[in-house]
């Protein structure tokens, strides 16, 4: 779930743990509102535009839920990637950035694991290194999500234009 207080977050692949350590108590409520509110802002436009594609919506909402979740696990990421297969027409329109991101994702995950051990187990690491690995992971994850959103919107636009052209052709024949 979601931790609304930013209090009990331990280091993970999300950057919220870093904000919970670094933020001053006066601004804690501001960051809680930001982290909790952004997914809600993206929900309604996606529902309005892509209401005809329920599997696409489920996949997008799963990506949003994982991206703004306070504790990301690799099982969540694998689940989100497996949902991409439910939308093969959108998947076929995705660009090369998705392939690059999927192939690059193991690097920050491996470095995060090593930095986690160095900082929390051996006591010789630095939390900033972990933060940068989390940022790299989130950039790759977000690029896959945005590429999927853009591919789904392109698909929707192509179908709307085809339907519009088909209707105009039929009306001109009559």
Image: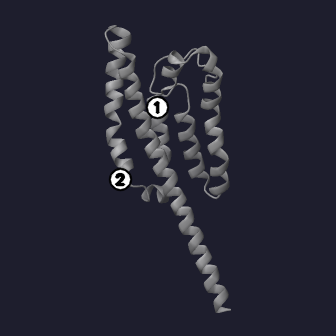
Q: How is the image coloured?
A: one colour
Category of crowding for the residue at label 2, using alpha-carbon neighbours closer than 10 angstroms: few (below 14), some (14–19), many (at least 20): few
* Residue most extreme to the top: 123
Q: Earlier in the sequence, mark 1 or mark 2?
A: 1
Which residue: 60% across, 49% down? 57
Residue depth check, mark 1 versus mark 2: number of the one nearer the observer: 2
**Residue 146 visible from this viewpoint:** yes
Cα separation between marks 1 and 2:
24 Å
Category of crowding for the residue at label 1, using alpha-carbon neighbours closer than 10 angstroms: few (below 14), some (14–19), many (at least 20): few
Q: Quadrant of the N terminus?
A: top right
x, y percent for residue 20:
54, 18
Asked which secondary structure carries label 1, the reply is helix
Asked which secondary structure carries label 2, the reply is helix
x, y percent for residue 25:
61, 14
Give the residue pinned by disc 1.
Answer: 75
Give the residue pinned by disc 2.
Answer: 96
| Location of residue 126 (image quadrant) | top left
Q: Is residue 8 left or right of residue 100?
A: right
């Amino acid at each position: 779930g979601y931790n609304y207080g930013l209090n009990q977050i331990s280091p993970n692949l999300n950057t919220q743990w870093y904000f919970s350590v670094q933020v001053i108590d006066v601004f804690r409520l501001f960051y809680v509102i930001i982290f909790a509110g952004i997914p809600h802002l993206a929900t309604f436009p996606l529902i309005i535009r892509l209401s005809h594609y329920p599997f696409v919506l489920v996949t997008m909402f799963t990506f949003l839920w994982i991206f703004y979740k306070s504790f990301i696990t690799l099982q969540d990421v694998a689940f989100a990637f497996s949902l991409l297969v439910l939308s093969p027409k959108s998947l076929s329109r995705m660009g090369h950035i998705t392939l690059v991101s999927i192939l690059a994702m193991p690097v920050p995950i491996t470095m995060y694991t090593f930095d986690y051990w160095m900082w929390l187990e051996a006591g010789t690491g630095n939390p900033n290194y972990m933060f940068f690995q989390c940022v790299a992971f989130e950039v790759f994850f977000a690029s896959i999500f945005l590429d999927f959103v853009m591919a789904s919107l392109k698909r929707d636009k192509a179908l709307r234009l085809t339907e519009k052209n088909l209707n105009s052709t039929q009306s001109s024949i009559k």
